[in-house]
Amino acid sequence: DQQVKQNSPSLSVQEGRISILNCDYTNSMFDYFLWYKKYPAEGPTFLISISSIKDKNEDGRFTVFLNKSAKHLSLHIVPSQPGDSAVYFCAASGDNNDMRFGAGTRLTVKP
Amino acid sequence: NAGVTQTPKFQVLKTGQSMTLQCAQDMNHEYMSWYRQDPGMGLRLIHYSVGAGITDQGEVPNGYNVSRSTTEDFPLRLLSAAPSQTSVYFCASSYSRLSYEQYFGPGTRLTVT
């Protein structure tokens, strides 16, 4: 039972353009959402998060949007850079410490 | 700070063998957790701990044991390895259970033959 889904296994964009990564969840008890970035042979690193009381959070080139009614969140990267090429994981958690991750989206930013 | 460290980086086991994956953090974090990453499945929570002496099960705990005798260390024990436990294992920590942003170790790649 995958409660967090990333339906696009991969995404390729041109350097300088916008990257949009999508994530859907099914559990309405989730109230905190995160994005992690992972390079090969390394552990994931935290990128950005959003609480369910907000619908947008921005950090530099990264913006996360949350649509609670649709149970959908997205990560926007503007402008995309070759160094952003990595696997991005969406994660969600409620108040029970049980964090659920999506399967990941591999982003490739072409120079 | 070394952050979150994991040993070994790679391990090959035969079916039925047991082993312990080590995890340590030097950030005085209360919350520690173990995940496994499998292709197409993302990361799945195995066990977690909200402080020394306290552990609980995550999404996929069967076949694994944990203990937390100190704040720094959170070892994961495979009791009798099975090929289904072939995976990459990540340990993570955060300041407290209310700090959702976790710091991950570099991972241990385990193959069970």
Image (cartoon, coloured by chain):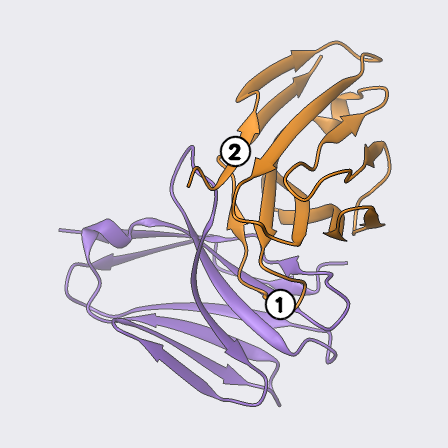
The secondary element bearing badge 1 is classed as: strand
Q: Which chain is orange?
A: B
Give the left or right position of residue B69, taking residue A46 as reference.
right
Give the left or right position of residue A2, taking residue B80 as reference.
left
Residue at position x 74%, y 28% in the image? B85
Instruction: Classify residue A69 by image quadrant.
Output: bottom right
For disc 1, the marked residue is: A92
Q: Position of residue B44 (x, y in %)?
A: 68, 48
Q: Amino acid at mark 1?
A: Ala
Q: Position of residue B48 (x, y in %)?
A: 74, 49
Q: Position of residue B88 (x, y in %)?
A: 59, 32
Quick one: B79 or B3, which is closer to the camera? Answer: B3
Instruction: Classify residue A27 by image quadrant.
Output: bottom right
Residue B5 badge: 2
Q: Quadrant of the N terminus of chain A?
A: bottom right
Mark 2 vs mark 1: in front? 2
Q: Which chain is purple?
A: A
Label 2 neighbourhood size at 10 Å, few (<14), some (14-19), many (20+)? Answer: many
